[in-house]
Amino acid sequence: MTAVAQNKSNHLPDILKKDTTAYQTKNDIRLSIGLDEGIPTADLSKYSSFVMGASLQGEYLVLKELGITLSANYLYFLGKDGGDGLSMLPALGGLNFYITPRVFLSGQLGASWYIGKDSDHDTYFTYAQGIGFQASKRISLLAKYEGINVGPSKTYSFAGLRVAYKFFKQK
């Protein structure tokens, strides 16, 4: 590397430098369990004040920069002003694109099902996108926006955070 190139790389923020903390390797398989929390937006904000849940996600790295994801979630939408809450089960598949070994963009599509005593057994189109940060080898954070299309021009959506712990990794 030339002296000019070395000098430029020394001025990059640490987050953009090559990092072994995330230790991505092609063909890695990762499983994580996460806590999901959020603030309802749009239609949902009329009925719910907070969203909380849990998720299980698998990721297979087809390239060092690209992972295929599958996730199963449980979301509980807390009722506003003492109203009844709402439980949903989203199942999503998508991609993680790693901008750096620690920073990634996430996009997922899938379906959700309402669960509860008045369940209608309908399937609802669901989408999620966000930006994530690999805080350590085991902990990742994802700021996301998720929407569940529950009818014509009606979406239950929220802006939230997923805090995940990787508990399994295989090469």
Image (cartoon, grey):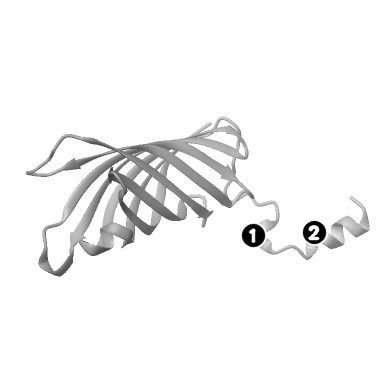
Q: Give the class, few, some or many, for how many residues have Cα within 10 Å of label 2's Cα (few <14, many ≥20).
A: few
Horizontally, residue 139 falls left or right of residue 88, namely right
Which is more toward the observer, 31 or 144?
144
The residue where tag 1 is placed is 15
Residue 29: mark:
none
The residue where tag 2 is placed is 9
Quadrant in the picture for residue 47: bottom left
Q: Give the class, few, some or many, for how many residues have Cα within 10 Å of label 1's Cα (few <14, many ≥20).
A: few
Residue 96 placed where, x, y %?
53, 42
Tag 2 near tag 1, CB within 8 Å: no
Which is more toward the observer, 80 or 9?
80
Type of amino acid under label 1: Ile
Which is more toward the observer, 33 or 39?
39
Type of amino acid under label 2: Ser
| CA separation in Å, label 2 and label 1 | 12 Å
Q: Report the residue at 70% width, 64% height from top.
A: 13
Residue 8 placed where, x, y %?
83, 61
Residue 70 in view? no
Q: Is residue 81 above or below residue 129?
A: below
